[in-house]
């Protein structure tokens, strides 16, 4: 599986740093990943939905640790490149 596109949408918020959209093999897209500032640095959060009990559950996520690391490395590199350019957006939800 190849990552064919990573789009980083910077945000200017205390914890939320960016929304991320990843395209695989030019035929499958995963939207609404988030880069969050955690206690130990940046964290990649998978897209999730809120359950009736108030908890959140991932909609999509890597199954293996190797693929998770590969995905995180690629996304964080793209985030760093976009962050160098600047221009974060204040507030608002994920991009369409």
Image (cartoon, rainbow, N blue to C red):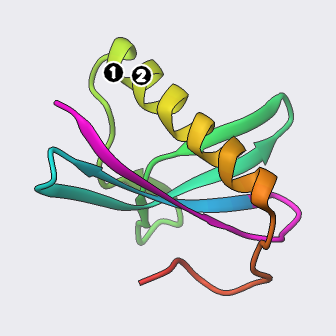
Res. 27 image quadrant: bottom left
- Tell me, for residue 1, which label it has, or none: none
Q: Residue furthest top?
A: 66
Q: Quadrant of the N terminus?
A: top left
Please state if 75 lies on the left or on the right of 43 as rendered: left
Res. 34 image quadrant: bottom right
Q: Nearer the viewer, residue 51 or 77?
A: 77
Q: Is residue 25 above or below residue 39?
A: below
Rendering coords of residue 48 (x, y %)? 42, 59
> Residue at left 34%, top 51%?
5
Which stretch did the figure color magenta? 1-16
> Residue at left 33%, top 21%?
67
Please state if 23 lies on the left or on the right of 50 as rendered: left
Q: Nearer the viewer, residue 42 or 78?
A: 78
Q: Nearer the viewer, residue 34 or 7?
A: 7
Local secondary structure at mark 1: helix
Alpha carbon of mark 1 to alpha carbon of mark 2: how far? Answer: 5 Å
Q: Disc 1, disc 2: CB below 8 Å?
A: yes
Rendering coords of residue 3 (x, y %)? 29, 39
The crowding category of the residue bearing disc 1, from other C-alpha atoms within 10 Å (few below 14, some 14 to 19, many at least 20), is few
Q: Residue furthest left?
A: 27
Q: Is residue 7 shown in magenta?
A: yes
Rendering coords of residue 39 (x, y %)? 86, 35
Q: Is residue 65 above or below residue 14?
A: above
Please state if 60 lies on the left or on the right of 74 as rendered: left
For label 1, the residue is 67
- Tell me, for residue 70, which label it has, or none: 2
> Residue at left 46%, top 20%?
69
Q: Nearer the viewer, residue 2 or 43?
A: 2
> Residue at left 81%, top 58%?
15
């Amino acid at each position: 599986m190849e990552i064919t596109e990573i789009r980083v949408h910077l945000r200017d918020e205390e914890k939320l740093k960016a929304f991320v959209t990843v395209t695989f093999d030019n035929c499958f897209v995963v939207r609404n990943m988030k880069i969050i500032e955690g206690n130990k640095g940046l964290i990649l959060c998978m897209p999730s939905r809120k359950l009736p009990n108030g908890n959140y559950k991932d909609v999509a996520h890597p199954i293996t640790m190797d693929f998770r690391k590969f995905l995180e490395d690629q996304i964080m590199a793209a985030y760093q490149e976009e962050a160098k350019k600047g221009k974060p957006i204040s507030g608002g939800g994920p991009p369409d």
